[in-house]
Image: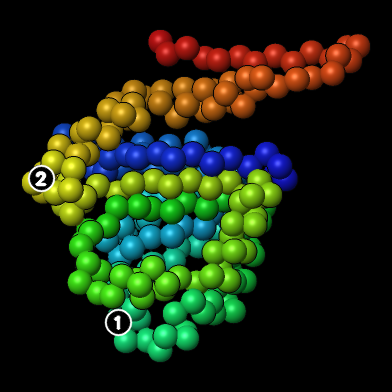
Amino acid sequence: MGGCATRHLISGSLLSSRMPDRIDAYADLIVRVGANLQPGQTLFVNALPEHVELARVLARSAYRAGAAFVDVRYVDPHVRRAQIELAPEDTLTDSPDWLIERATALEGNAVASIAGEAEPELLADLDQERVGKTRMVGVIERALKIQNERAVNWTIAAYPNEGWAEQVFGEPDVERLWDAIAATVRLGDPDAVEQQLSESLTQRLTGLSLTSTPGLTVTVRSRKPS
């Protein structure tokens, strides 16, 4: 995959009583379009405990797409709060060796990070200087290096929840948020994944300059929705 890595920022919907296949369609969109997972790759998933339902469906979608392995890491915001509040100052930027190794393993693979905090104000009452300082610098630097080298496909996918809905609408109307985001990524369209794969390929080829070579033909076909 080398320099052909991709990154997409996508948001989507979860399961609702009106659209029981929605979470599966969203997971396929994340895996096949957002992360552009290829057969034989590992899919790394970064999530919060509240994201467990989506993380599990992502795993099923990834294995259907040919993933060799799915590695899911959950980070508990309340554990992070405890670190910010109580850990020694000189340890706030430390990175465990095993997490640096995990970041190194991203190379040649794909990663999906799930966004959407259920408690957006959880850290609001803490020392904001310590909040900003508490981050695993070694892990971040290793991951950013691999991303900047275009050696990993990565995506960020949103998980609707009450806390996020409250921020957007002023009320915890999760169903309304699901509907709005589902419409944005065309989850009601049964050909959404194929369409967006085609559009993604077309965007990558737009402006591509090829040196004229006798006998070389490049054809791009886009299947239009029926």
Vertical side of 46 occupied by 138: above or below: below
Q: Residue at x 35, y 81 (%)?
A: 83
**Left or right side of 9 for 81:** left
Q: Which x, y percent locates residue 50?
A: 27, 61
Q: Which x, y percent locates residue 58?
A: 41, 50
**Left or right side of 158 for 164:** left
Quadrant, the N terminus: top right
Q: Kindly give the residue lying farthest to the bottom in the view shown.
A: 88
From this viewpoint, is residue 101 visible?
yes
Q: Kindly give the residue lying farthest to the left in the view shown.
A: 171
User: What kind of element bears circle 2?
Assistant: loop
Q: Residues within 10 Å of mark 2 (few under 14, many from 20)?
A: few
Vertical side of 149 occupied by 130: above or below: below
Disc 2: which residue:
170
**Left or right side of 87 for 5:** right
Considering depth in this image, is 55 or 134 the residue closer to the camera? 134
Q: Residue at x 41, y 23 (%)?
A: 191
Please identify the quarter of the rendering in which residue 120 is found.
bottom left
Q: Which x, y percent locates residue 166?
A: 14, 49
**Left or right side of 123 for 146:** right
Quadrant, the C terminus: top left
Q: Residues within 10 Å of mark 1 (few under 14, many from 20)?
A: some
Please identify the quarter of the rendering in which residue 72 is found.
bottom left
- The image's mark for residue 85 is 1
Q: Residue at x 49, y 76 (%)?
A: 93
Q: Kindly give the residue lying farthest to the right in the view shown.
A: 214
Label 1 to label 2: alpha-carbon separation: 29 Å
